[in-house]
Image (tube, helix red, strand yellow):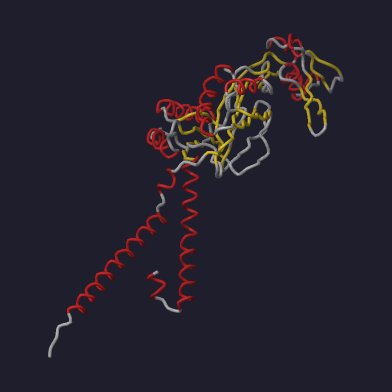
Amino acid sequence: MLRTDAGFAEHAYEMDTSELHRTRILMAALALTTNRSMNPGDLAEEKTAPAERIETMEMYTRGPADNLMRPKPLDRDGPVTEVLSLGEEIVTDVTTLVGRGASRFMLAYNPEQADASYGQLIVRATDATLIPDVAARLNRELLAQFPNALIRVEEIVFGPPAGADVAVRFSGPDPVVLRQLSADTLAIFDEAGTITNPRTDWRQREILVEPIVDEARMRLAGATRGSISDTVQYGTSGLRVGTLREGDAEIPMYLRLPEVERDGLDRLRDLSVWSPGANGYVPMANLASGFEPRLVEALIHRRDRERTITVLGGAGGDLTADEAFRSVRSDIEAIRLPEGYTMKWGGEFESAGEAQVSLGKQLPLGFLVMLTISILMFNKVRQPLIL
């Protein structure tokens, strides 16, 4: 008797269908894994989570200098009172640092270079949810309280610090051109309205007093340019003559005229210059016909031996670093660069790119090791490939 096994045909059909589904799932998983490993693009859009209880405020002085040349040192006690009064509902502790930042105490903290006009306040708060509101108020009201200071308030975040959410670097030979390029970028930041705390890493210019020396008279009097320079420093910003050690601290000692005698460049002509050749003092008026004040760059950064100015800013509001970056990218890349000048992106964009390159180099090796271990475990090739 001949009998058709319908059940066997049905099971065969189900097995063929399951094999087809398994093949599709494996192909989709392989395509997704390859796509994410080769192009993890959206990873850059995630915003680093802020720490729960700490924020930092960094302050720079700008504008009026102490007499002619030296930036005025930051007052240690002035901003602390304002911070406590403006954030009294959540502020519990304020650590004040003047001249340099704190020692690096966590991965996310990036200390600044030592500078007499630099100060930092590390503020501890009781409630993390109130920090953004207090930070916005400090940014707004402290600038009115201290108009001669460059103030920014930032929350310490978990993860390696990138320096700024959005950063663009211009490199080239002429500082004047670099300043103009940075000014154009800052204007784009302001117009976009998505960037907070726009700034550059070159800081403000300083006044340099350059004497117009009569070389013939200087040689005749037995004086030197070094002695003339010392005299100009003595009459303006101060001539460093030593260091006072107080415990572990080193306090520089400066010699200079009283403040009432430092009210203009004309006073410098009345000073006397030490002449090693004559073993005596010579009037400054006999050696210099005048003095020329001019603005000079007090701080110039270099990358790969090229002058480089970096324009920095943070993401405004609830924007991520990637959203703030995209809001200004096209306008900044449209800036015309003179010949010999280059532009390169930094900040979170650069950090994400470096992370993707590192991931792309290490991921294939990881897959190869996993596949090798699976083959050794099953002693076959087919099962590991299916898994």
Q: Residue at x 76, y 25 (%)?
A: 226
Q: Where 239 sits versus 284, above or below?
A: below
Q: Position of residue 331 (x, y in %)?
A: 38, 33
Q: Position of residue 236 (x, y in %)?
A: 71, 17
In this rendering, does residue 280 appear at all? Answer: yes
In this rendering, does residue 168 appear at all? Answer: no
Pick whichever, 246 or 334, lies toward us.
246
Q: Residue at x 74, y 24 (%)?
A: 225
Q: Position of residue 361 (x, y in %)?
A: 48, 58
* Quarter in which the C terminus is drawn: bottom left
Q: Residue at x 53, y 41 (%)?
A: 162
Is 181 placed left or right of 298 in the picture?
A: left
* Quarter in which the N terminus is drawn: bottom left
**Residue most extreme to the bottom:** 1
**Residue most extreme to the left:** 1
Q: Position of residue 182 (x, y in %)?
A: 49, 29
Pick whichever, 51 or 218, lies toward us.
51
